[in-house]
Image: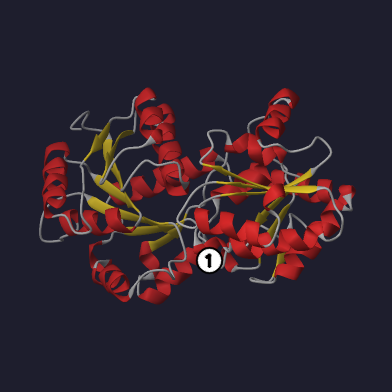
C-alpha cells in the first residue's frame, strides 16, 4: 500500500463483504474514492473473517481486497495477521466498520504510544443489542479512536451517551443510488417467479430476518389487511436467523399462501420497484439502506416511529410513521395507502426527491474524503 508520497493511504477493515447494509456502503465508498479521488487517496479493503459477494465488485473496480481469516470470537492469530498487514501496508488511516473490526482494529492500531495509523470507527446502528462486555470494550477503546462516524444522528447520540466526546463524533449519512427502475418485462417476470397475480397489490420488506425487524408484527398486520378483502401479497426478501420461524408463523395465521419468502435475492432493487408499499417495523435501526432504496424507488413507505427512521421519513410528507409494535396501525396505514393512489404517489415522489437532494452516493463519498483530509492533517 506504500505509494505516492502525496497520497493518503486508507485501509478499510470490515468483518465480511456479505450483501448487507454496512458492506454495501463500504463498497460504494471504496469504489467512489478509487474512481473520483485516486489522486488524493489510495484505498484498500481488508476483511477480518471472510470475503463475500461485494469482493468481486471491489476488485473489478481496482480496489485490492485481503481476507484475514478470523475463525473464533477472539482469534489471536487473526489479530496477529491484522497487525502484520498494517505493518506491511503502512496506511495513514485505518477505517473500521462494525463491532468485530472496530474492536480488532483499535486493539492493533489505536495505541497512542505506538506509531501507526489514525483510527476512524464507523458505527451503523443504535446498538441496544450489545451485551455489557461489548459496551465496556467500546468505552475502553474510546481513547484509541480518532473519529467515530455514525450514519444517523440517533447513532451518534447513542455513542455520546456511552462516553464518546463530541469532538470525535460526526454524522455521515448513507448514500443511495437513484438509477432508473426495471422494465415492465422484469416486473412481470418477478410476479411470475413469486406467483403473484397481475391484479394483486404488493407489500414488501427487504432486509435481515432478525428479531429487531419485528416481522411477526408485519405478518399479523398483513393478516389484518387481508381481512379487508383486499387482493394483496406480501414479499419478504432477505434471510436470517428467524426465517424458518417466520415461515411457520405465516402458516399458523393462515397467510402463507399470500406471503413469499425470497431468501437472499440478487435483484432487491427490482423487488422494491414491484412493491406498492414498503414496510419497516424495526424497534431499533441505524440508517436503513433498504428504507432509503425504497424511497429512492418512489415506493410509499410505512415505518416504525423511531428516531433513526424519523431522520428519513417525515410523517405525511415522505411516508407514514406509526408506533413501534402497533400492528393495527401498520395495517390501517397500509389500507389507507392502498385505497388512495394519489396520496401514495405523492408520498413516493416526495421521498425520491429527498433521497436525490440529501442522500447521494457522491455526497457520502465526499463527506468521508473531508474527514480523511482532516485526520491526515492531524486536526484531531
* Coordinates of residue 178 in the picture (x, y in percent): 63, 36
Residue in the image at 32% along x and 47% along y: 14
Q: Up-down: is 3 above or below 231? A: above
Q: Quadrant of the N terminus?
A: top left
CA neighbours of label 1 inside 10 A, class few (<14), some (14 to 19), many (20+): many
Residue 368 is situated, as x and y percent measured from the top left of the image, at: 42, 46
Residue 338 makes an appearance in the image = yes
Q: Tell how many labels.
A: 1
x and y, in percent, of residue 183 in the image: 71, 25
- Is 236 in front, or is 167? 236
Name the residue rendered at 47%, 66% in the picture. Answer: 126
Q: Residue at x 57, y 57 (%)?
A: 248
Does the image show residue 320? no
Q: How is the image coloured?
A: secondary structure
Which quadrant: the C terminus?
bottom left
Q: Is residue 331 left or right of residue 247?
A: right
Residue where numbered disc 1 is placed: 284
| Residue 144 picture quarter | bottom left
Q: Helix, strand or loop at disc 1? A: loop
Could you tell whether 117 is left or right of 238 in the image?
Answer: left
Residue 335 in the image: state x and y as whole percent. 83, 58
Q: Residue 337 sits in which quadrant?
A: bottom right
- Residue shown at 40%/35% (left/top)? 54
Query: Looking at the image, is 23 positioned above or below residue 5?
Result: below
Please give left or right for residue 263 compared with residue 273 in the image: left
Q: In front: 241, or 151?
A: 241
Amino acid at each position: 500500500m506504500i505509494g505516492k508520497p502525496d497520497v493518503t493511504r486508507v485501509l478499510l477493515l470490515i468483518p465480511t463483504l456479505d450483501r448487507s447494509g454496512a458492506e454495501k456502503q463500504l463498497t460504494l465508498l471504496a469504489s467512489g474514492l478509487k474512481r473520483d479521488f485516486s489522486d488524493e487517496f489510495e484505498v484498500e479493503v481488508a476483511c477480518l473473517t471472510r470475503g463475500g459477494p461485494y469482493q468481486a465488485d471491489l476488485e473489478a473496480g481496482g480496489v485490492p481486497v485481503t481476507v484475514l481469516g478470523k475463525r473464533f470470537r477472539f482469534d489471536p492469530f487473526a489479530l496477529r495477521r491484522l497487525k502484520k498487514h498494517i505493518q506491511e501496508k503502512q496506511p495513514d488511516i485505518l477505517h473500521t466498520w462494525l463491532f468485530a473490526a472496530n474492536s480488532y482494529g483499535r486493539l492493533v492500531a489505536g495505541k497512542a504510544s505506538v506509531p501507526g495509523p489514525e483510527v476512524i470507527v464507523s458505527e451503523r446502528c443504535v446498538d441496544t443489542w450489545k451485551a455489557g462486555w461489548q459496551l465496556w470494550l467500546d468505552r475502553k477503546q474510546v481513547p484509541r479512536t480518532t473519529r467515530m462516524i455514525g450514519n444517523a444522528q440517533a447513532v451518534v447520540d447513542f455513542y455520546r451517551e456511552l462516553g464518546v466526546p463530541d469532538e470525535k463524533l460526526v454524522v455521515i449519512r448513507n448514500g443511495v443510488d437513484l438509477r432508473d427502475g426495471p422494465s415492465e418485462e422484469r416486473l412481470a417476470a418477478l410476479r411470475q417467479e413469486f406467483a403473484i397475480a397481475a391484479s394483486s397489490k404488493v407489500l414488501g420488506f427487504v432486509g435481515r430476518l432478525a428479531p429487531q425487524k419485528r416481522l411477526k408484527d408485519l405478518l399479523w398486520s398483513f393478516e389484518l389487511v387481508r381481512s379487508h378483502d383486499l387482493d394483496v401479497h406480501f414479499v419478504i426478501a432477505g434471510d436470517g436467523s428467524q426465517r424458518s420461524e417466520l415461515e411457520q408463523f405465516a402458516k399458523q395465521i393462515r397467510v402463507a399462501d399470500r406471503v413469499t419468502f425470497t431468501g437472499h435475492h440478487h435483484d432487491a432493487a427490482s423487488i422494491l420497484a414491484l412493491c406498492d408499499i414498503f414496510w419497516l417495523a424495526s424497534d431499533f435501526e441505524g440508517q436503513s439502506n433498504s428504507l432509503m432504496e425504497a424511497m429512492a424507488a418512489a415506493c410509499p413507505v410505512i415505518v416504525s416511529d423511531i428516531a433513526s427512521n424519523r431522520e428519513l421519513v417525515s410523517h405525511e410528507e415522505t411516508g407514514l410513521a406509526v408506533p413501534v409494535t402497533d400492528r393495527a396501525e401498520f395495517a390501517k396505514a397500509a389500507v389507507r395507502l392502498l385505497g388512495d393512489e394519489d396520496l401514495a404517489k405523492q408520498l413516493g415522489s416526495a421521498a425520491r426527491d429527498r433521497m436525490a437532494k440529501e442522500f447521494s452516493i457522491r455526497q457520502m463519498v465526499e463527506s468521508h474524503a473531508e474527514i480523511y483530509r482532516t485526520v491526515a492533517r492531524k486536526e484531531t
